[in-house]
Amino acid sequence: MTEAAGPTLKPYGEWPSPISAVSLVSGAVGVGGLCVDGDDLWWSEARPDEGGRVAIMCRRDGRVVEVTPPNAYARTLVHEYGGGAWTVSDGSLFYVELADQRIRRISGEGEPEPLTPEPPSNSSHRYADFVVTPDRNWLVAVRERHVEEGEPVNELVAVPTSGSGETMVLWQGSDFVMSPRISPAGDQLVWVAWDHPSMPWDVTELWIADFSSGAIVGPRCLVGNGSEALCEPGWSADGRLLVCTDRDDWWNLHEVDPESGSLTAVVGGSFEIATPPWVFGMQRWSVSGEHVAAVAGMPGGDELVIDGSTLAMLDTSISSLHATSDGFAYIGAGWGHESVLVQIHLDQQGGVRREEVATFRDLPVDPGFLVEPTPITYPTADGAVAHALYFAPLNPHHVGPDDALPPLLVLAHGGPTAQARRQLQLGVLYWTSRGVAVVDVDYRGSTGYGRAYRRALDGQWGVADVADCVAAAKYLVDHDDVDGDRLMIRGGSAGGFTVLSALAFHDVFAVGASRYGVADLAALASDTHKFESRYTDTLVGPWPDAREIYEARSPIHHVDGFDRPMIVLQGSEDQIVPPNQSEMIVAALESKGVPVAYLLFEGEQHGFRAADNIVAALEAELAFFGEILGFTPDGELPPVEIRR
């Protein structure tokens, strides 16, 4: 008998891999926004193959159909980030059409009919996060009304489902609103409100009012102590009001007395149930009959807690949790599978059964390439600690030389109030399968570790996050996991700012990639959308009073520090980080003779949604990194124009 051949020896970074950039998007579906309507399950699908178009799907009697017509694009532009663009009630779908931001209804097999009037100018009236009243006569929604002068007006409105178009304004008493939720009896409305300069994960209030016939009476602040962030309010079927708050450091679930506002803990511990509401419609808890379920965010991934007991699940990322007739449903993903639609069935004997009721494509990679990361906690600047997920290189057919260590790609997530994703990401395996180690950093300011850790970035953006990314790389170098001479860093948006700052103020990384990153904090503070227009007040300091800090932290003012090559990628229609931010840094690098590549993607906004652009961006980064670090990636890659 002959023994099976072992893995082939090949330099790190040059391993042949079946995970192509095309495989990331070919047939891929971004699943979100689950809704339960009777026994039917509804969800949204974002399709890169169709330019990122979002379609609404329904599973009824075991059969899946697309309810929206082929030309529909269900996406709201409220806060620019959107979310909460649709809902379902009694078989009728209500959704926001991207083209004009009007709410439309589809009943049965009918055609979409507009429920909101044409705005004064295109997309100037935007709607999101709506809920249908129990009598089905009204939609209560967040509206963002853009005006000729000044910032947009964010308000709560009631939209008649009759189609009369007469929209009623319910509330204008705060800079921002989210999560309007109507009681099961239809007589009370709660919502979350907050004001500049806070973000919805800093300080919010829970408001309540009596509701009747498209109007509210007696609005009052029910909960809010000035130092807590309340989010994800909702009602159980029997009329209990619940909400998540971080007043005890962790976003845990509490029941609220609708009269006194007193709180009683329902599900709690050293874990986060809620996540930062960057988009509308987040839901990580639910009540089904006598059963309470919540998602507990842990360092290694999400866990599902039902009636106080933690269930062993395949899913390490759980979102859009809703009650069903016999349990719960959610969208789940894990280290070994992409997003699937899951139902949890509970029986009267306490049994629990997990069922995958919808999958969206076959796993486009052999299980031998799957990497489950190692959570690491490591020392960083100022005697603090930081957290990260470390992905070692893995390819069942190839190994690196004994006398070499792999290059390392450090990932800086966006936000910055966000966290590394706890699920299978082909975009990470794209690198590990080629012999590149990856570390996804949860720098100070990230969620998942309590309010104190999240607020540790206050006043320290561009300092603490950068120090934590640098420390992660040094930690892995010191432990002989990676090659200290081949350290790469990549990030988008706020993560792009971290990349630029790391290259401007430190000499640890050999090369970087910035996707729509912030180069000039002052420009960001004066030229961005309303939602984030005061974000930097907390992260950096009040603008313009803290002008000196803004200049000291802005990479564009420290081009002398740039001597490492960089690739910069940008969307031409980005309203959050406009293209001029990227173009300033590219021009500065080019003027210094530092190798730089710049890719501008026409029609893209904040983040790349079209399949061709997702592919082009990733392939360009690999080609650029290989060129700079001296390794030759396997296979054909389009050439990247490098300005020197």
Image (tube, rainbow, N blue to C red):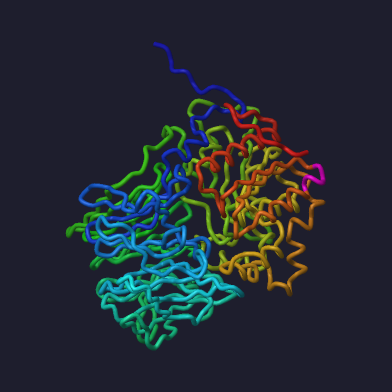
Q: Nearer the viewer, residue 264 or 46?
A: 46
Q: Residue furthest left?
A: 348
In the image, residue 332 above or below residue 259:
above
Q: Is residue 265 visible?
A: no
| Magenta highlight: main SS | helix
Does 225 sit left or right of 34 as displayed?
A: right
Q: Nearer the viewer, residue 495 or 526?
A: 526
Q: Residue at x 44, y 52 (%)?
A: 301
Q: Quadrant location of the C terminus?
A: top right
Return the x and y of residue 327 as percentages of the image width and height.
25, 59
Return the x and y of residue 615 as percentages of the image width and height.
54, 39
Does 582 sit left or right of 454 as displayed?
A: right
Does 265 sit left or right of 596 as displayed?
A: left
Q: Residue furthest top?
A: 1
In the image, residue 509 above or below residue 299:
above
Return the x and y of residue 266 as percentages of the image width and height.
35, 71
In the image, residue 448 above or below residue 482:
below
How many labels were placed on the picture?
0
Q: Quadrant location of the N terminus?
A: top left
Q: Is residue 472 visible?
A: yes
Magenta span contains residue 314: no
Does 486 sit left or right of 217 as displayed?
A: right
Q: Quadrant of residue 523?
A: bottom right
Return the x and y of residue 50 as percentages of the image width and height.
44, 44
Q: Residue at x 46, y 58 (%)?
A: 98
Q: Nearer the viewer, residue 117 or 376?
A: 117
Please state the extent of the stretch shown in magenta in the rendering. 589-593
